[in-house]
Amino acid sequence: MGEIIKWLNVNQGFVMSILTCVYVLATIVIVIYNRKSIKEMQKGREEESRPYIFANLQKDPRDLCFYLRIKNYGKTGGKINDINISPSLKFADDDKIDVFLKNTILAPGQSIQFIILEQSEETSKNHYDVTIKYSSTYNSKKSYFEEYKLIIQYAHQMGYSDNKKSNISDEANAMYNIANYLDAIRNKL
């Protein structure tokens, strides 16, 4: 033990330079891992707060046709740059949906709904491929691309529920439901 202490005293500069090298290497490793962690955290924040725009088919059991709903499920606004649904769906006035929706901005939670002008059996025969290109309203340089198939079988399983408020009378509930139904019709038109 005494010899080790003597050697360290004699070679003090050499030992300090080795310890300094170890310290510098450890600091470099810590900086590298911190940068990776920060990048992952930034990516996670971006993924959490970005727009998520999707199209889906919905069927109300009270109607004979489907509705195409395009909704922003994200936390920031999104601008639709391009949308393509193949094979084409039949809309009012033979409008092309991609032309109508180009540069449309959807706020978080906002949706646009279109009536499909064909019987639900006819719509159910096809499988639809959807591609949507959109960008964030927060950062227009950041664009996103979604490509998927619309699954018709689940659209039939959507149910209908009657909303009843427990704190009002049956007559008031009926009036409330009628008002909501009329609003829904107005929104479809």
Image (tube, helix red, strand yellow):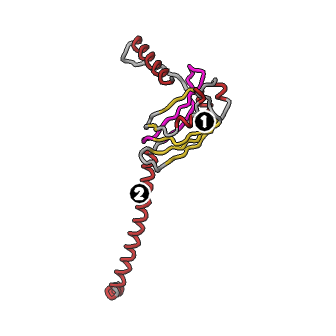
Residue type at mark 1: give it.
Leu
Q: Residues within 10 Å of mark 2 (few under 14, many from 20)?
A: few
Asked if residue 102 is among those painted magenta in the image, a careful observer would answer: no
Over which residues does the magenta segment extend? 52-77
Residue farthest left in this picture: 9
Q: Which mark is residue 150?
A: 1
Q: Is residue 17 left or right of residue 102?
A: left
Q: Residue at x 45, y 52 (%)?
A: 43
Residue 177 lies, with reference to residue 126, above or below; the image says above
Residue 130, image x and y in percent? Answer: 59, 39
Question: Could you tell me how many numbered marks the image carries?
Answer: 2
Residue 62 lies, with reference to residue 141, above or below; the image says above
Residue at the disc numbered 2:
38
Q: Residue at x 40, y 65 (%)?
A: 31
Residue 36 lies, with reference to residue 1, above or below; the image says above
Residue type at mark 2: give it.
Ile
